Image (spheres, rainbow, N blue to C red):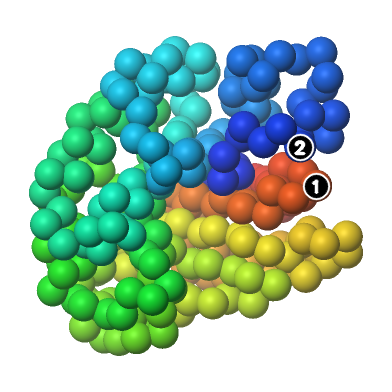
Amino acid sequence: MPVLVGTSGWQYRHWRGVFYPPQVPQKRWLEYYAERFATVENNGTFYRLPGRDTFGEWHARTPDGFVMAIKASRYLSHIRRLRDPAEPVRRMLEAASGLAGTLGPVLIQLPPGLTADPALLDECLRQFPADVRVAVEPRHDSWWTDAVRSVLTDRGAALCWADRAGTAVTPLWRTAGWGYLRFHEGAASPWPRYGEAELRAWAGRIAATWPRSAPVYAYFNNDQEGAAVQDAAAFAGITG
């Protein structure tokens, strides 16, 4: 299957007139977005976990085949810092069940100051059913060890490949039969855009790592000036 490309969030007011036409009301932005991209990473769920009915509404507003990834609540990743994960994981998955077949991967982004604890990570990943894809984005260099890689591989969780300024800030490990990428900030002009050479280099890394049959999810988080939607459209054209 082609790489599924989208952006980290869709409800940015500064995208009005850049991506969303002025005549399209904000309450219709998701529909407009879903007509143009195959997936979105819902990063609003990091700040506040909506109820099941809200997830169900999002599901009803998007077409068949559209995929919504969700960012795990900061209560799990930043407040509890992966400790005692059973209850927050259960609540999150119960709410997200409203998405039904459109639920994509769950992203767990770890705090920058959280140092490696393979046992803690393993216990957290153990709470997820086998049919839920989980990606993990550590942000401290202590996580880049064989022990951490083994935990991810054994649990079938994907290491989130992350880019900043056109450079990988994570190892390019393949720990699952699917992939997950996040593009935080490009090095092209105007900032924070990604240049064609950067995007083609990432497309080459994907092609060298996964077969075409493997799902790979890629999200652009450089929302400033609407750069994310422009870069996502360009990357979809390269990888499609």
Q: Position of residue 210 (x, y in %)?
A: 45, 62
Residue designated by label 2 = 14
State the image quarter where residue 56 is shown: top left
Q: Is residue 4 left or right of residue 91?
A: right
Q: Is residue 158 left or right of residue 193?
A: left
Q: Give the alpha-carbon distance from disc 1 to disc 2, as whole Å.
A: 7 Å
Q: Position of residue 45 (x, y in %)?
A: 41, 39
Depth order, front residue of 43/169: 43
Badge 2 amino acid: His
Depth order, front residue of 205/62: 62
Q: Is residue 76 above or below residue 189?
A: above
Sequence-first disc among 1 and 2: 2
Q: Position of residue 136 (x, y in %)?
A: 35, 62
Q: Position of residue 205 (x, y in %)?
A: 57, 70
At x 41%, y 45%, the residue is 46
At x 45%, y 79%, the residue is 171
Residue designated by label 1 = 225
